[in-house]
Image (cartoon, helix red, strand yellow):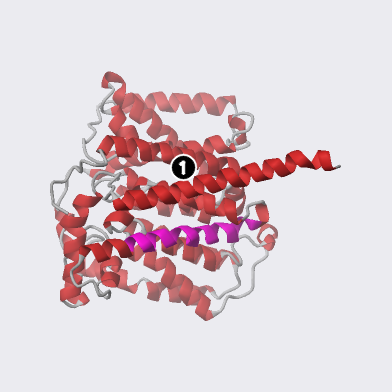
Amino acid sequence: MTLGRHPTGSKINLETVGLSVMVFCAATSFLIGFLLGEDSIGGARFDFYLFHWPAIELFSSISWGTAVADYGGAANNPLLYAIVSLLPLHGDQKIYHVITFLAALLTWPFLSWAYYRRYSNYEIDWLWALFGASTIVISPSFRSSAFWGNTDYLPLIFCAGTSLLLSRFQDAEGNFKGEKARTIGLFTLVALAATSASAFYTRQLYAFVPIFAAWIVLRRTETSPLLVLSVFFVAMLPEMFLVYLWKGINPPVSQSVQVFHPTMINVLGVGANIGLLAIPLVLGCIRRSLADVLPEWWGALSTVMAFAGLLVFIIALRGTEWPELGGGIIVKTGLRVGAFGTPFILTVSYFGLVAAILLAMHSSTNALLVGSFLVPFFVVRESYQHYLEPSLAVALFLFADTQTAKTLFNKRVLTYNFLFSALILTIAILYYDLFNHLSKIPR
């Protein structure tokens, strides 16, 4: 019996050691990246000096009511600037960068806690939850935002907080039988509305968080719909004021700067980035064949129709002009491979859009998540890859319906997602040249 158990113990020890080493390497790289001033998305340093730091100084020097009217070219909502204006920075950028670094670093265990609370019943312990969340630490978007004090790291804190507040009833066993949890308290409801709305008030692209939170409370609990809608309506009043003040969802200056017409380019760019970022998620769920990730009704006819649709998609959009700026690895690669570049971009985009549609068809919860997550990307000027990475995986892990979440959040997916993110980080650092920043603005 002792000999029979020995391989299992060795496997567990090897797994623990391997995970610990990867987690340690991720944390170490995060610290090194901060000390070296890494800008692995290529524009965070430039954005900080041109948009974010001037906005912080503006909110620190005048009243918020006056500052929100227009704070330059920063197109995001103003919560970060309002929070930072309360800190005793004394105009010192180094203090601000240290604060954002520490806040972002603490986001990692906070997100791990949210993962653990949701998946602890599905063979996920604390170490695997920490490892799954460590992907954000090697995410170019998250790192650049943390190191340069931009806005993209902060909404993930509110995503994790929203998930923790939903965890008591989001995946309750009674949900599968059509049962609902008991009415949640007013304090919890207010905390949920405020936390979820805070993600949106940092970045408009996180509008899906309060929408999804309200949906889950309405669908999963016996709380009065009138009370739920009233509390979330009050939480959204500041946004209504901003829309009225700005005459749109972005500050006036950013509305007037149009690089190109966004609709078609953004739809295809978002599809391409989904196609890229979904690779480790799909591969991690495949054990025998693609049938493991396709819906039950998918057959030979569906496959033929999908490839026919791809052919039509490529032919119909072959004349699309891709902007040099923005996009992501797929778009930038396509721009450099000659005649096959546009078909390459369109193919990846097509399969990304198909994946999003299939996910939405799985349940009404997924349909709401996909719709509310994607729609904001189609109204901004450019949809960069760092808008979806790592928010795409975080949104799926925290907010997809229970069955989808259980399928996605497995050890194979977490491992592939970590390795894939490490590859993207390596490419990003090499592409943007870590030690030779694009911007010539002095530190």
Instruction: Check disc 1 and report its element: helix, strand or loop.
Output: helix
Instruction: Give the residue drawn at x 53%, y 60%.
Output: 114
User: Majority secondary structure of the magenta segment?
Assistant: helix
The magenta segment is 100-120
- Is 25 on the left or on the right of 124, as rendered? left
Instruction: Give the residue drawn at x 43%, y 62%.
Output: 106
Residue 419 seen by the camera: yes
Mark count = 1
Locate residue 236, reporting x and y percent: 36, 71
Quarter-of-image position of residue 223: bottom right
Residue 390 seen by the camera: no
Locate residue 159, reporting x and y percent: 45, 61
**Label 1 sits on what residue type?**
Ala
Locate residue 166, reporting x and y percent: 55, 66
- The correct choice, above or below, for 320 with respect to 124 in the image is above
Badge 1: how crowded within 10 Å, few (<14), some, or many (20+)? many
Specify the quadrant that holds the N terminus: top right
- Is 430 on the left or on the right of 171, as rendered? left
Asked if residue 69 is among those painted magenta in the image, a careful observer would answer: no
Q: Nearer the viewer, residue 340 or 236?
A: 340
- The correct choice, above or below, for 411 with respect to 294 in the image is below
Q: Nearer the viewer, residue 202 or 375?
A: 202
- The correct choice, above or below, for 343 with respect to 412 in the image is above
Specify the quadrant that holds the C terminus: bottom left
Asked if residue 101 is among those painted magenta in the image, a careful observer would answer: yes
Q: Nearer the viewer, residue 268 or 18?
A: 18
Instruction: Give the residue drawn at x 32%, y 38%.
Output: 428
Instruction: Give the residue drawn at x 48%, y 42%.
Output: 418
Q: Which residue is mark 1?
A: 356
